[in-house]
Image (cartoon, rainbow, N blue to C red):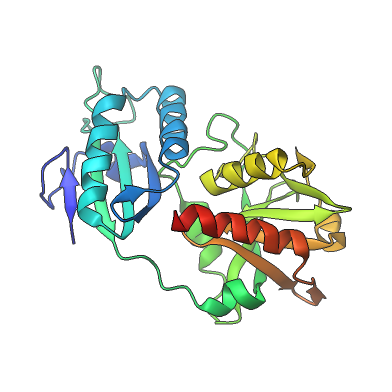
Amino acid sequence: MLIWVDGQPVGLLSVKDRGLAYGDGLFETIAVKSGRPILFERHMQRLVEGCKRLAIPLDEPDVRRQLLEFSHLVGDGVTKLILTRGDGLRGYASPNPSQPRLILQAAPSPAYPAVHAEQGVRLFPCATRLAEQPLLAGLKHLNRLEQVLARDEWQDAEHAEGLMRDVSGRVIEGVYSNLLLVSGGVLVTADLSRCGVAGVMRAELLAQAHDQGITCEVRDVSYDELLAADEVMLCNSLYGVWPVRGLLTHDWPVGPLTRKLQAIAQDILDC
């Protein structure tokens, strides 16, 4: 496996690293096509915003340079970028000054079953709830225990993703995907100002849908509204768009707007 730590091709990591000890850091999972990171600017925008909120010093030009060079070596696959606050002493207090650590890892593109995109997937109703923390909401931070616990709730092949709600019962997202629904011709996705991950594919699809005259709304979504939706779909930056065809005893058709956004997402991943 190709791994860089602070620009060097090594596989060792200090046990003092605060990302390992406390999840003190951020990450981005980036599709790479012909040596080019897909949705590069959106990934960087989210990383910059995360560093700003967590007060992690960021040498943005250097991160950009390393990511582009590393992705060129990857060719086709996935680059995982991890940025931690670096080493620290025992205790929660951050080192002053911090010396952030940049870790880049390469992996093959995931081999998702074609049927997920063609026929749609079923959602598992996760019991694990997302806690509300506005400071962290939207960020791809390293604290992923909620998602780990949620993913461990099902082991069967019938469900490709899980539905995650917040502590108040609002529909938020999938375990590793964003959720979108269509209601009366309007494209709706959850408000992620309290919790959840603001996915880069979600952002790009909303922007392109708006440019094509599709009405989009970002707001709270109740469980009942989800069940009453005309179409439901999932998206992320690796697989694009999957139609959602069922949750428990409820079924949805694979509708025209889902197929339209699926085609847009595929164009993004193929370009």
**Total residue callouts:** 0
Residue appearing at x 11%, y 48% in the figure:
9
Residue 187's x, y, as percent? 77, 49
Q: Is residue 172 visible?
A: yes
Q: Is residue 75 above or below residue 139?
A: below
Residue at the farthest top position: 96
Residue 177's x, y, as percent? 56, 56
Residue 270's x, y, as percent? 45, 58
Identify which residue, 182 or 194, lies in the foreground. 182
Identify which residue, 90 or 8, lies in the foreground. 8
Q: Is residue 176 visible?
A: no
Residue appearing at x 18%, y 52% in the figure:
3
Report which quarter residue 141 is drawn in.
top left
Identify which residue, 227 or 154, lies in the foreground. 227
Q: Is residue 154 above or below residue 75?
A: below
Residue appearing at x 70%, y 53% in the figure:
180
In which quadrant will I find the N terminus? bottom left
Q: Is residue 240 above or below residue 91?
A: below
162 displayed left or right of 62 = right
Residue 11's x, y, as percent? 13, 53
